[in-house]
């Protein structure tokens, strides 16, 4: 059959790929057995946490092409050309994202390990649904496990951030 | 995955097939990747990423419901078309798969191409008499979903053919359906069993019935005795209870544990009772 497709070729076990990380185009050199989670952490995006490494805990959540996804299940080379958002792209210490502020104000953070993933899932939810119900929030965050809290404060934080995003108006 | 030497992103079905056939046994197509990313065989050197194929649609075509193989579980969960088709059973099933993060990534095509007893969709598609549009060396054609489990179906989806679309026949549009997953927790992928139940009812009489059970065998199991029992029968709590016992007998073939049989029968009896508007209950 005629080869009418483009392809990447590994050289010495490494692929050269391009990602749009937090709006900035970056070149990555990734091992052929490496997952996006490890590649991002190796390149300095330490907010992406390594928890279970099997797609169960949600600590490695990043937004890939608009959808919260598990970086531990994405072969790094297969993400070539994708737009990736990590928490580093959301806010800074001086100018935090409204969700980050809401999580702090609600006391939703204890050890903090699950929070980057949870905030990215919540961001994607609020981008799609500006006034989510509690049921919608619970469903959307069901892949982000927290072992410190009972999820109550985090759900309150997402509700508060949604309200703030709507300019303080009730849904 | 350490042996991957090439990675391609074909944009058309023909290009995807060419990428697979170019490397024969060394190539594998991957869509969402949630089932295979961690378990790619060492023999695979060519990763064919399907993410650029334009097959994420959910549309009505010629009276049928057509779902692109790259539609994610989340797409199917939220689609108005799937929510309004066959009692929304496809959305119901999609929503019961694992976590939101998995539902964002996993595709219906991958759920079929990588057979696993815990997969959500096979029992539903078996019950809805779905068809698959595939491309292989001999071109594009439609095959019954159930054919992929037959020994004479020699093509391996994702290796020497690519699933393009899933076709849900128009006759199922107004079927009364329900999907149940019996598992340890809401987000557990490993279910004790999953159950697809459907009935076409006219004037209080069951004209068509389907019961398919997942997670108990490598391929979805059709409870044919329970289906046969229901066909032509008037809906009542008595017929619901008898149909439930019939399902228990069907499940004996799988040597399913007693608690599984009883739970499945209870859920089935409840479903049939809900159709008759009478109170559910399995009499023993």
Image (cartoon, rainbow, N blue to C red):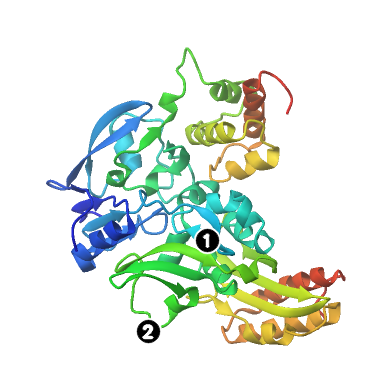
Quarter of the rendering containing residue B113: bottom left
For image coordinates 34% across by 64% down, the residue present is B158
Instruction: Classify residue A116 as left or right of residue B134.
Output: right
Marks 1 and 2, how far apart at CA: 26 Å
Q: Quadrant of the N terminus of chain B?
A: bottom left
Both labels 1 and 2 in a single chain:
yes
Q: Position of residue B66 (x, y in %)?
A: 52, 61
Percent position of residue A110, x then y:
56, 30
Q: Which mark is residue A161?
A: none
Q: Kindly identify the residue that appears in the image at 43 percent across and 40 percent down.
A: A60
User: Pointer 1 and pointer 2: residues touching (CB < 8 Å)?
Assistant: no
**Furthest residue toward top:** A94
Q: Which mark is residue B152?
A: 2
Q: Nearer the viewer, residue A114 or A71?
A: A71
Residue topped by disc 1: B66
Estimate the x, y position of residue B58 in percent, counting from the top left: 53, 54
Please rate how many residues cluster around mark 2, counting C-alpha atoms within 10 Å: few if below 14, some from 14 to 19, many from 20.
Answer: few
Q: Residue furthest front?
A: B62
Q: Is residue B179 left or right of residue B10?
A: right
Q: Is residue B33 visible?
A: yes
Using the image, determine if residue B120 lies above or below residue A78. Answer: below
């Amino acid at each position: 059959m005629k080869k009418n497709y483009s392809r990447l070729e590994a050289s010495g076990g490494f692929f050269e790929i391009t990602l749009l990380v937090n709006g900035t185009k970056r070149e990555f050199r990734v091992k052929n057995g490496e997952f996006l989670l490890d590649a991002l952490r190796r390149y300095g995006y330490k907010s992406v946490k390594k928890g279970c490494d099997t797609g169960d805990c949600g600590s490695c959540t990043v937004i890939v092409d608009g959808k919260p996804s598990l970086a531990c299940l994405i072969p790094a080379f297969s993400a070539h050309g994708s737009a990736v958002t990590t928490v580093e792209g959301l806010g800074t210490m001086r100018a935090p994202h409204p969700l980050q502020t809401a999580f702090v104000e609600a006391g939703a953070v204890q050890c903090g390990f699950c929070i980057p993933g949870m905030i990215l899932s919540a961001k994607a939810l609020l981008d799609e649904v500006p006034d989510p119900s509690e049921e919608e929030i619970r469903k959307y965050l069901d892949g982000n496990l927290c072992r410190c809290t009972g999820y109550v404060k985090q759900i309150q934080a997402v509700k508060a951030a949604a309200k703030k995003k709507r300019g303080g108006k009730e849904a | 995955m350490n042996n991957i030497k090439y990675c391609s992103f074909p944009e058309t079905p023909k290009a995807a097939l060419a990428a697979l056939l170019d490397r024969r046994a060394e190539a594998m197509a991957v869509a969402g990747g949630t089932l295979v990313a961690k378990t790619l065989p060492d023999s695979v050197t060519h990763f064919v990423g399907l993410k650029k194929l334009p097959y994420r649609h959910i549309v009505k075509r010629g009276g049928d419901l057509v779902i692109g193989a790259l539609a994610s579980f989340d797409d199917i969960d939220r689609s108005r078309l799937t929510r309004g088709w066959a009692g929304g059973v496809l959305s119901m099933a999609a929503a019961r798969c694992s976590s939101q993060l998995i539902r964002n990534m996993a595709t219906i095509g991958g759920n079929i191409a990588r057979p696993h007893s815990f997969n959500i969709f096979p029992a539903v598609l078996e019950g809805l008499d779905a068809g698959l549009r595939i491309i292989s060396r001999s071109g594009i054609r439609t095959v019954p979903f159930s054919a992929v489990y037959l020994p004479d179906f020699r093509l391996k989806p994702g290796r020497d053919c690519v699933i393009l679309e899933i076709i849900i026949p128009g006759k199922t549009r107004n079927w009364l359906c329900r999907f149940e997953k019996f598992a340890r927790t809401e987000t557990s992928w490993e279910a004790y069993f999953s159950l697809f139940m459907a009935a076409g009812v006219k004037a209080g009489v069951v004209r068509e019935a389907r019961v398919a059970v997942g997670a108990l065998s490598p391929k979805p199991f059709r409870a044919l005795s329970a289906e046969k029992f229901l066909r032509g029968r008037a809906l009542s709590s008595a017929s619901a209870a008898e149909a439930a016992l019939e399902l228990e007998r069907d499940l004996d073939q799988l040597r399913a544990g007693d608690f599984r049989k009883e739970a499945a029968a209870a859920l089935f009896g409840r479903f049939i009772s809900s159709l008759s508007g009478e109170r559910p209950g399995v009499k023993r």
